[in-house]
Amino acid sequence: MRGPQLAGLFGKPVQLAHGGSTVANEDYLRESILNPTAKVVAGYQPVMPTFKGQIGEDDLLQLISYIKTLQPAAAAAAGAAGGNPGGMP
Ligand code: HEM
């Protein structure tokens, strides 16, 4: 794996490579796609290419909404099974 897991990322705190942390909101996802080296995730190298100039505003908004829908595999499986282990009621 080259990059961090995007599933379950939205709304979570992110530890940054140069110290401090941020929250993975829409603005952070947008910046991470257009200017990935602005906030590098702790534990990763800044190897992600910029998608600035390659992706239009509509596609960017769609990517951001898609990332928001991604859940970790375990949560997705639990949801599919109708279970809710350890989740909020
Ligand atoms: C459409 C394509 C891509 C999207 C939407 C995307 C999105 C993201 C996002 C949202 C983050 C921040 C993750 C976090 O806070 O946990 C991230 C980080 C990262 N991505 Fe990507 N990425 C893409 C393509 C790539 C590619 C092609 C590579 C490598 C060749 C890559 C490598 C990385 C790495 C190493 C990081 C962590 C370091 C950093 O924060 O810059 N990504 N990516």
Image (cartoon, grey):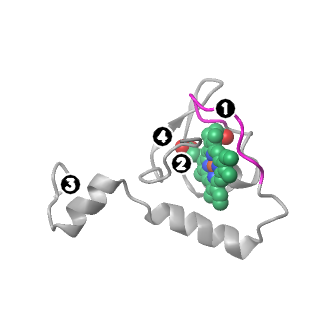
Q: Which label's residue is closer to the chain start, 2 or 1?
A: 2
Mark 2 CB lies closer than 8 A to ligand 1: yes
Q: Position of residue 85 (x, y in %)?
A: 15, 52
Of the residues shown, which amino acid type is indicated by label 1?
Gln
The disc, 4 or 1, on the residue closer to the chain's N-terminal end is: 4
N-terminal of the two: label 2 or label 3? 2
Which residue is identified by label 3? 88
Circle number at residue 23: none
Between disc 4 and disc 1, the foreground one is 1
Q: What amino acid type should be assigned to the residue bearing mark 2?
A: Ala
Instruction: Determine whether, in the image, residue 66 is placed left or right of residue 71.
Output: right
Whether residue 45 appears in magenta in the rendering, the answer is yes
Quadrant where the C terminus is found in the figure: bottom left
Q: What's the magenta region?
A: 40-50
Chief secondary structure of the magenta portion: loop
Up the image or down, 1 lies above or below 18; here it is below
- Mark 2 or 4, nearer chain start: 4
Cα–Cα span, label 2 and label 3 = 20 Å
Q: Which residue is mark 1?
A: 45
User: Mark 2 = which residue?
Assistant: 24
Residue sitting at the far front: 1
Specify whether residue 69 is painted magenta. Answer: no
Residue 64 position in % (x across, y down): 59, 64
**Tag 3: amino acid:** Met
State whether residue 48 is above or below residue 56: above
Q: Give the spatial CA distance, label 4 vs label 1.
A: 19 Å
Residue 46 in sight: yes
The residue carrying pointer 3 sits among few (fewer than 14), some (14 to 19) or many (20 or more) residues within 10 Å by Cα, namely few
Give the residue at mark 4. 13
Question: Residue 73: image x %, image y %?
Answer: 33, 55
Question: Would residue 52 be found to the left or right of residue 86 on screen?
Answer: right
Residue type at mark 4?
Pro
